[in-house]
Amino acid sequence: MFRSSPLLLSLFAGLCACGPKTGPDVIAPPRETREQAPAWDQSAMERFGLNRSAPESSPKTQAQPAQRLAWDLPSGWTERPQTQMRLANFLVQGNTDAECFLTLLGGDGGGMLANINRWRSQMGLSPMEAAEVDALPKARFMSDMAVLIDFEGSYSGMGGGEGRPGWRMLGLLLVEPQGSAFFKATGPSALLATERENFLKLAASLRIEDAPAANSESSAPAAPASEAGGGAADKGKEMAGTIPTASAEALQWQPPAGWREGPKKSMRAVTYLVGPEPSVECYITVLPGESGGMRANINRWRDQLDASELSQAEVDALTRIPMLGSTGRLLEIDGTGASAGKKMLAALSVSSQRSVFVRLTGPKELLESEREHFRAFAASIQERK
Amino acid sequence: MKRIFDALSSLWLSALLLSLLALLTWLGTLEQVDHGLYEVQKKYFESFFLFHDFGPISIPLPGANLVMWILLVNIVLGGIVRLRKSKATIGVLTTHIGIIMLLVAGFVKNYFSTDGHVTLFEGESASHYQSYYRWEVAIAEEKPDGTVVEHLLHHDQVASSAGAEGRVFRSPALPFELRLSHFLKNCRPMPKGPMFEVKVPVSEGLFLSSVPLETEAEANIAGVCVTATGRDGTQASGLLWGVERAPLTVRFEGRRFGLTLRHERYPMPFEIQLLDFIKEEHPRMAMAKAFESDVKVREEGTERTVKIEMNAPLRDRGLVLYQASWGPQNAGPDTPLFSTLSVVSNPADQYPLYACIVIAAGMLLHFLMKLAHYLRSQQSKREAVS
Amino acid sequence: MSTLIRITLTWILGALLAAGAAAQNWTPRTVELFESLPVQDGGRIKPTSTLANFLLLRLSGKTSLKLEDGTGLSHTQWLLDVMFQPEKAAAYPVFLVPDSDVLDAIGVGHEGRKKRDRYSLNELKPGVMKLFELGQEYSRREPKLRSSLEQNVVTLAENINEYGSITGRMQLASVPPDVSIEQDEAWHSPEELFSRQRAGESIPAAHAAMLEDYLELAKRRDKPAEFEQQLEKIHGATLQLAEARGEYAKVPLEIRYYDLGLIQWSLSAFLFSFVLVAFAWLFSRSRALYAGSISVAAIATVLLSIAIVLRCIIRGRPPVSTLYETVIFITAVGCIVGLVTEWIQRNRLALSATAILGVVGVFIANGYETLDKRDTMPSLVAVLDTNFWLATHVTAITIGYAAGLFAAILASIFLLSRLFQIARQDKSYYTSLTRMTYGVLCFGVIFSTVGTILGGIWANDSWGRFWGWDPKENGALLIVLSQLVILHLRMGGYIRDFGIAMLAAFGGMIVAFSWWGVNLLGVGLHSYGFTSGISSALHTYYIVQAGIMVLGAVGQLIELNRQQAAVPATVSFASDSQRSAS
């Protein structure tokens, strides 16, 4: 049976010689279409949807996130398209060597010291000690106070290699365990020195805003959903991913004037935006049962603001306010150390049935002005009758 | 000659081919975990030849396409021609005929069918459907009377324009020649910053950056660089990207052309308008129970309303339209939904059904005959013993 | 034998415990009423007892609860406590924590407890907030990438959250709308009605009355006799509304199905038949033992089949629509094939295979149910919700699986017999095994082939492509191809009994890959059988089956050697020259 193999093999080889099709070099004759005339003379940015200010006309176009980053652009600075790492991207005075961008990370990104020293090594400078970092000045950045750096040196960029002398790096770093923000500008030393004020103004103006809610997803439903219509599989994933609160349907409350209702977030019965900055939120959490008890939770929050723990006696001595038909506790926590300048107002009502926590965190001055509002809000939480 | 015939019609060849097909099927299944169905399908099942990597070693294998062609020859020569034709082999013969029908259906589908989808929001209509994976470059020109005329470069021409050289295309009807180059299967436009160099053309401060292929091949967005050279030597160049919203405009000899890269489009002999998309969920659950599209079909002056739902497609004029899916994902209660109808033009659409009936009949016949024979022999054995 | 005794004793004990527990709080009639109270959950109407059953299974890994003082609660009694005596229920050790590392992560002490133990809500309360925070964080990661600790945290958080949404509340959707199904499909919970009423919406009079009744029920929670009275009233009113919509018809049947526990009975019967078959081999002349073992195996198969039929009636669907149902169906079909083969051959071989398949199959079914922890009669996604294709394609493929597996068992018996040199003198033992294997394969290949093609036709009607090289489709094709290869090689005389046995045994691995393996790959349109934890069982089977093949080969070599050595010297010259000529 193997004697006919050579012939079979050559048949096999012959068939394999059929290569892939490539088509002719001549373009086929044209055909008429029922299409509309195209939109002529658009720039590449517009064509690829990279221009943020492109007008949204049909519901099929790129979705705007319900919240987006906003800022006040200094004169002479231009915006560049977002990239994966750079959520806001700018060119300083049109100089292609001078760029400035914002990076957000979920986590502390290695910590303040590590990041500062990484930047220093990009500038060909020797690392700093922790004490020197503590002594660095602070400036406003995304409605918070961040560490400000101003380094002069020889810039070798993120890829290393030959450095470019006479460079300056301006930067602001906000590092927290839950998330970090970095705002960095690099460019010729003299240019950045003149633009330093603009840099700081831009950094202070960075904020999160509600965008007009657009309704649907991108125009290219590129990945048709799986056979379950996409809905089931993704809904399933969504529901598995969120752990919704014990229902707060049985409660009602009265928000103070000037507080706007914020976006729905998992684990929270409701969120209110207090004051002008959307990062200052007051929210209610409802959990079944005692959920750890008052002291444990209070000390956890105090720890978040780097404040010392309270003893049981101190917890018992906290101000009482009427809440949910009985009495709850009210407390203020002042941040120290890395959280200096921050404040938290909190109210707790803990029973064997459920625990209700109300929290407002933000800059000290703002919270002090909202103190009465907060009290009234906490006291207004009641069972639905 | 006889030896060739013997080999091609032999049972050992059948067993070998079936085993090879099984091996390819198994390898192709495992490969899908990392590489996505579309690529694996092209490499293992639609090809004639491939190399499979068992770790560091690369082994050559015949592709499933080749195996099935040879199997067709084998089953005709061995399973029909050479097979002893008697009452005992009717069942086997029938089964083999059924399998031949199935193989033929497969080849017809492979070489003569096109498929794609048409995605519409409620109220929208379309008279073409588009491919999930194949791309074309369209050169559009608006005539003075307002109609739009298009020259098309289809997928094979576009996809073979890879690398810096690319390919040059010409037409007597166009005042320029078009060079396509640097075709990428999956890419995104990126700004060219000062900190790095790129080896690809940069246009308007952007370049097309290649990204890894998606596992779901429909999510790949292709891109290509174009340079149009007029008869007077003037040039215009730019980038074309698969999901661009508008074409690249070029002008030659007073005429204006729009160049765009998009999914291949196939005209339908009728126009479809989505009247209503209905999605029903199981009560108190987020699981889809049923979804259907009510569409209006307009052809040559007549129109009718048709319901297309899961497991109940629309068959008309050689095309079949199925309710494939919908979106967007994570839609809220008030978000307008779009319905995706998948469209297939397949001359062999019903062949598998006929083949199935023939195969089932053949196998059943053969098995029952054998069983009856065996039972009878058991019975006579028992009678002989007692 | 000991397994059987253990199972029987557990039942007796369980019954005693249940009887004792009735003295707890709720009258027996209360429990009965609550069990049969219809509720809408998972998209269908089911008795509350089914919901309680799977809820308790999900939280604690068992379908009944044993308290620290030794008393036992049935799942319905537990649910009654959870809803109406939440403080009491909070002390029940119901949350299964598979690894005490989870407790360390959330700061809950566990001195003196086993690594894998059950805890009450009270014990877990101090760590709940931390648990929820960690759960939120870990749940953002893809399930495949989570470590076992992370997955345990997420599961525990989800369980406590689910518990929290039920305890002390009336969240179950037990109020049918008072209009027909076409007008309104969704049932309501008393809490929903309560909120709507409070919000000022108007609700139908029938619902307002029901709501009042439920509120009154909650008030009477400490008075068992009055609670029963009120529940009687609610039960009657609910039944009226449900029957008007035609939604109550199958509920009593479902309760009956679970009460009968047919599947557990069939397991005991299969075990018993296995024992009898073993004895029938030892005392091969005893007709009584032979008759007995066949009867018991048949009874077991009948019980299993009745269970399947009941499920079909309850759900109004063909027998196979979920992965769980494939297990019991394959077991039943395989056993029927085995019993029929035994009737034809009558040499105890097929019977042994039947007993083995029965025991293993029902064990796997129970194991899967516990692993999956969800209602085994769920609602189906849109594309599967078609009785025609479920009845034809899925049933055919499943029968094909059953035949392939049964053939593998027969082949394994062949190979192991070779290894242990059983029935060395008796050629008919091996020839009949081969014949049976071959016969079962022929039977199987019809269903595998037709089933696979039907699958393609269904896919063509749904998605526009007959064959997509999807993993599940490929798995089915592999089975068809392997069975065809065996048939063609045998036809050509290239393999005989040993070859058939080896290839059929390998075929078993192919069936297992197609049945379970492809779901584990997590790719393709068919990965809707969520099967975490199956992986190790599957790989164990692969190893065992491969081992049997290897050992069988060893046995065959020994046998061949023995046969060669036995050939007398005078004949050897002639046969030598014959061999070299061919």
Image: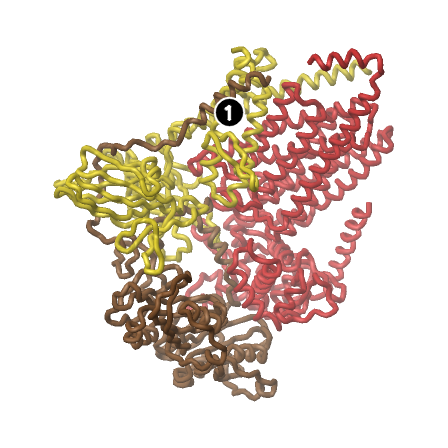
Chain colours: A brown, B yellow, C red
Q: Is residue A142 visible?
A: no
Which residue position is annotated with label 1? B357
Residue C369 % position (x, y)? 64, 49
Viewer-nearest residue: B266 or B304: B266
Residue B293 % position (x, y)? 37, 44
Residue C506 % position (x, y)? 66, 33
Q: Is residue A97 left or right of residue A15?
A: left
Vertical comparison of C207 with A111: above or below? above
Q: Is residue A205 visible?
A: yes
Query: What chain letter is assigned to the residue under label 1?
Result: B
At a point 70% along the width and 19% down the height, the residue shown is B375
Q: Residues within 10 Å of mark 1 (few under 14, many from 20)?
A: some
At a point 77% along the width and 57% down the height, the residue shown is C16
Viewer-nearest residue: C151 or B201: B201
At a point 62% along the width and 55% down the height, the residue shown is C54
Q: Could you tell me which secondary element the residue under label 1 belongs to?
A: helix
Q: The C terminus of chain B appears in which quarter of the rendering?
A: top right
Q: Is residue C504 left or right of residue C393?
A: right
Q: Quadrant of residue C479?
A: top right
Figure disc tally:
1
Viewer-nearest residue: C47 or C500: C500
Residue C306 % position (x, y)? 66, 39
Vertical comparison of C481 with C237: above or below? above
Q: What type is the residue that disc 1 sits on?
A: Ile
